[in-house]
Image (cartoon, rainbow, N blue to C red):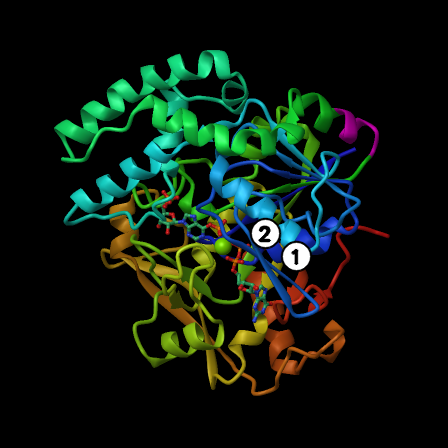
Amino acid sequence: MSATVVIGAQWGDEGKGKLVDVLASHADLVVRFQGGSNAGHTLVVNGKKTVLHLIPSGILHTDKTCVIAAGVVIDIFGLTDEIKKLKEAGFHITSEQLLISDNATALLPYHKVLDKAREAALSDGKIGTTGKGIGPAYEDRAARRALMMADLFDSKTLMAKLEFVLKEKNALFQGLYDLPSISAKEIYDQVQTVIEELRPYRTADVSLLVSTKIKQGKRVVFEGAQGTLLDVYHGTYPFVTSSSTIAASGAISAGVGPQNLSKIVGVFKAYCTRVGSGPFPSELHDEIGQKIQKDGHEFGSTTGRARRCGWLDLVALRYAIRLNGINSLAMMKLDVLTGHEQIGICTGYKVNGEIVSEFPTSTELVTKAEPIYEYLPGWTEDLTKIKAVKDLPRNVLKYIEFVAQQAGCPIDVVSVGPDRDQTLWIKPLFKD
Ligand code: GDP
Ligand code: IMO
Ligand code: MG
């Protein structure tokens, strides 16, 4: 048996949350495997919007199990707030519905302070982080000084662990950033205000659980965050996030063998967006870019920042297909492209006078890349009420076929609106 991995094939915000919510109705388990509250995954069901940051996007299906695996950095205050908001919306989150790995990294308030202080100190070259403390939390994990979720439940040893980690943080706050120090007692007390609310969801062995489910033939969906071009190893470094966002990272985080992940779904927008700094070859700085931004409501679900917009970039998409092993594509937000006379598609780059078809591994070269476009005729029809692929206008079908052929990968799903039911299947990903 095998699991399905859903990952972003661009710079994030592709619509992963929506797709995972749709797939979750056919699944048993949804596993969020990396990132933290930097993610904002939007689900819309019958017009009602829910934005999730840490809780897996299967949570609105009350009979499914959602798991937060070891590779996630968990802002415990953000997480309790998300649970509270879901409860207020009528979703009582039981301990069968949500499981949190004891081995996940705890993201604590000092990580956010450090993230913001670092960004503020950079005059040029700001990454444009979400300010959610992601980099500092992953750093602590790699440096072997992070507190894990299990540590927060052990009030006897917590204080000593906080004192140890804050010694170094306070030297940075005071010595480098001119900020007040943070006491271990302060953090300890804050942790105590929420930790008992999280205890029911505590899970020791996520690896055993997920492996057993896969062996039993249950359907497991892995939910990625961010996007391939924000991957810490393969993205446009240093304008990336601090985790590995690609499909293989799911196996590492959940503690299952990589051969279990065989259906790799790459979620991409019918155009491109990027939030934060860094190169974006097909970015449009004109009224077309502004129209896409307006029609697509391209403002971040986590920070509210305007997203930069541009035409679809096939060089970047093919790179994402290669890095992840994507064997199925989901094209999202196709409805947003209505009303353009012609649709541009970036099929290659010109770099230092040479035409290239592969995404450059050097960020400097990506910055220099000039897009080469092909244009297809646009369409004027509203797509949002269409219920079957065969009813899509001719030019829309031509666009889908062109992209799939150029990408060298089938497009199995097309999304024509934010709602769960605005989803068209070219080939169902699950058979029931
Ligand atoms: P994620 O981070 O990949 O889950 O994506 P986000 O939720 O941050 O951003 C995607 C945005 O587009 C959200 O506001 C979704 O509700 C919305 N969305 C998703 N699919 C579609 C679609 O097909 N059409 C339109 N118009 N909006 C969509
Ligand atoms: P979802 O899961 C889009 C971007 C930030 C910044 C860079 C580093 O909703 O697709 P970080 O706070 O992670 O250190 O910021 O990564 N970024 C995202 N952009 N969608 C996201 O998540 C993102 N998470 C981080 O804007 O450029
Ligand atoms: Mg998002």
Q: Position of residue 5 (x, y in %)?
A: 64, 42
Residue shown at 64%/54% (left/top)?
88
Under tag 1, what secondary structure? Answer: loop
Label disc, if present, on residue 387 of the rendered structure:
none
Under tag 2, what secondary structure? Answer: helix
Label disc, if present, on residue 89 of the rendered structure:
1
Q: Which amino acid, by three-letter code, is at mark 1?
A: Ala
Query: In the depicted view, which residue is nearer to us: 85 or 217?
Result: 85
Query: In the depicted view, which residue is nearer to us: 381 or 19?
Result: 19
Residue shown at 35%/23% (left/top)?
185
In the image, residue 372 lies in the stretch drawn in magenta: no
Residue shown at 68%/53% (left/top)?
21
In the image, residue 216 lies in the stretch drawn in magenta: yes
Task: Please state if 136 lies on the left or on the right of 98 as rendered.
Answer: left
Residue segment shown in magenta: 212-217
- Residue 372 image-quadrant placement: bottom left
Q: Position of residue 179 (x, y in %)?
A: 18, 35
Q: Is residue 159 above or below residue 220?
A: above
Task: Please state if 417 lies on the left or on the right of 114 as rendered.
Answer: right
Label disc, if present, on residue 85 of the rendered structure:
2
Q: Is residue 129 above or below residue 341?
A: above
Q: Is residue 21 above or below residue 336?
A: above
